[in-house]
Image (cartoon, rainbow, N blue to C red):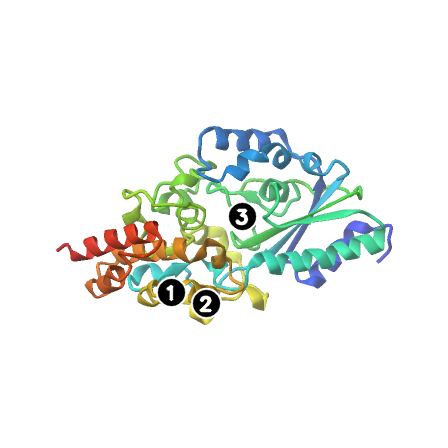
Amino acid sequence: MAASDPRAAIAARATGIGFDAVGFCAARLAPEAAENLRAFIAGGHHGTMDWLEERAEQRAQPTALWPDARSVIVLGLSYAPDGDVLANLARPDIGNIAAYARGRDYHDVVKGKLKALAQFVVSRFAADVKVFVDTAPVMEKPLAMQAGIGWQGKQTVLVSRRHGTWLFLGAIYTTLDLASDAPHADRCGTCTSCMDICPTNAIPVPYRLDATRCIAYLTIEHHGPIAHELRPLMGNRVFGCDDCLAVCPWNNFAQATREAKLRARPELESPRLADLARLDDAAFRALFAASPVKRTGRDRFVRNVLIAIGNSGDASLRPAAQDLTNDADPVVAEAARWAAERLASP
């Protein structure tokens, strides 16, 4: 591949490394990306995710984070599940874990591939690069839309015609001047499936998410007790929520992920709530080693498990909740009392 054709060479290497989608855009976001971010924060829809507000300006423009950036290489890695990820919702004795968290931590998998591609760019084209995957002030979804990979659906998740809603995104900022792909058109049409299925009405209007009502936010990002009025709506979701992703019609075209590390570990596909409630810190760390679930810590996770137990309607799970009513963590203890009381009611 000739060095005079950097886009083709980079795309070919990205595919060889295992990425499922690659696109290019200028290191410049359209003004509406910053406007949408400001409106999201001004409305308080970011909840306790203060880091969104603290670095909003860097997030709004790639060059605000790195002034030397000229282009962005946007990569997508499919984690499309094999089977119905919503099947567990009908099993109240099971703790449902979002599809993305049933395998290896995507940060490690995607970053490893990004670094390999970045090394290729540096060695082949003598360019400077910086790699990002979900841990820096980078607006991956608007960049992916500008790079032609997909569009942000009405639930604000990136949607791809080939991979549906199941793409992990990563970005490489570079000093290379690369021609941009055409931005992807919005293909949601009149469909509102993602909005209609949301258990907590966290998508009140198209393209606007209220994270403070989103089960993914509540079970992962939110510290402290969860509002009592939202608890019954959470069902048995103990980490994340796939409802608005799984229902998207574009998933009909998605093929199960090729990346073995992202496939579901058997022990995380249908874990029993009774077993999860018994996890102490050491057991929690052992079970969720190299998993995204580990970042919540034992206390927050067991809080979620207890809410699922309280929603189960299964009186046989009441002892599991009762055992934790005096837990050292006050949030866990409160959730345990709530669950035990619900299961004691007729």
Q: Label 3 amino acid?
A: Val
Q: Nearer the viewer, mark 3 or mark 2?
A: 2
Left or right of 100 in this view: 302:
left
Viewer-proximal residue among 224 and 69 = 224
Report x, y in % for residue 60.
Answer: 62, 34
Q: Label 1 amino acid?
A: Leu
Rounded to the nearest angstrom, the CA distance separating label 3 from label 1 is 36 Å
Q: Which residue lies under the disc numbered 2?
A: 287
Report x, y in % for residue 6.
Answer: 81, 50
Viewer-proximal residue among 150 and 89 = 89
Mark 1 is surrounded, within 10 Å at the Cα level, by few (under 14), some (14 to 19) or many (20 or more) other residues, namely some
Q: Who's the residue at 53% across and 31% down the image?
A: 36
Viewer-proximal residue among 211 and 284 = 284
Q: Which residue lies under the disc numbered 1?
A: 279
Q: Residue 56 carries which label?
A: none
* Mark 3 or mark 1: whose residue is earlier in sequence: 3
Q: Which residue lies under the disc numbered 3?
A: 159
**Can see residue 9?**
no
Q: Is label 2 in contact with label 1 (beta carbons under 8 Å)?
A: yes
Mark 2 is surrounded, within 10 Å at the Cα level, by few (under 14), some (14 to 19) or many (20 or more) other residues, namely some
